[in-house]
Amino acid sequence: MTNVTIFGSGNMGTAIAGVLEAGGASVDHVGSAGGTVTGDVVVLAVPYPALDAIVASHGDQLAGRVVVDITNPLDFSTFDSLVVADGSSATAELAAKLPSSSVLKAFNTTFAATLATKKVGDLDTTVLIAGDDAAAKQTLADLIDAGGVHAVDAGSLARAHELEAIGFLQLTLAAGEKIGWTGGFGVVR
């Protein structure tokens, strides 16, 4: 059984926990300011601005673990841009701060509702995963697939930039009421 620690118990943290627990993982939640990381896989289901605080308070506990960044580094005051440098990503920034961790980007192109129902319209929900550690990506993909959601390897950590752009577009469409929070992008396999 794989042990997973999730930072964040909001809609996304809860939905991700549901998928992973359905696949047989043991999941515990910790707060960004306290708690002990026990999972081999750690999911950061928090807003982008919270990443620095987690690195500061738990960085040493994240060493040697698979760390999954779900954030979309969106300017929430304007909803009109990403706040990372062009060509970079929140995940690349995080990986630079956690050189002893296997940092992945995943879950940022899905909404909590599509994870909970495992559907995007008539399609099965798909989680795109980017990262440079093939074994870490396979570990996460196996957990997601076991939980009844499809996982697709989207490529290297450099692809996190594109995944964040997709997440940004999806969020702005939903906030602008162009699509519902139960909708989004689907992948036909």
Image: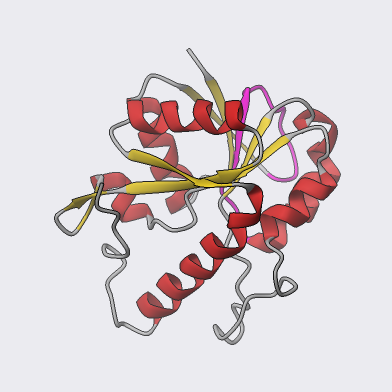
- Residue drawn at (36%, 75%) of the image: 174
Asked where in the image residue 30 lies, by quadrant, the reply is top right
In front of the other: 182 or 163:
163
Q: Is residue 73 magenta?
A: no
Task: Indicate whether 23 appears above or below 171.
Answer: above
Start and end of the magenta stretch? Answer: 32-47
Residue at horizontal 59 percent and vertical 87 percent from the top: 78
Q: Residue at x 14, y 55 (%)?
A: 122
Residue 8 appears in the figure: no
Position of residue 98 relative to residue 35, above or below, is below
Seen as rendered, the residue at the extreme left is: 122
Q: Position of residue 31 (x, y in %)?
A: 66, 42
Apparent side of residue 172 relative to residue 92 in the rendered image (left or right):
left
Residue 148 on image: x %, y %: 28, 33
Question: In the image, what residue occupies the spot 51% across and 28% down?
Answer: 138
Residue 165 in the figure: left or right of residue 124? right
In the image, residue 25 above or below residue 168: above
Residue 82, position as x, y percentages in the image: 63, 75
- Residue furthest to the top in view is 1
Residue 137 at least partly seen: yes
Q: Is residue 68 above or below residue 26?
A: below
Q: Is residue 91 left or right of residue 106?
A: right
Task: State whether the magenta stretch is mostly helix, strand or loop.
Answer: loop
Picture quadrant of residue 76: bottom right
| Colour theme | secondary structure
Residue 140 locus on image (x, y percent): 50, 31
Is residue 128 or residue 144 the one in the foreground? Answer: 128
Q: Which sits in the foreground, 164 or 49?
A: 164
Q: Quadrant of residue 16?
A: top left
- Tag count: 0
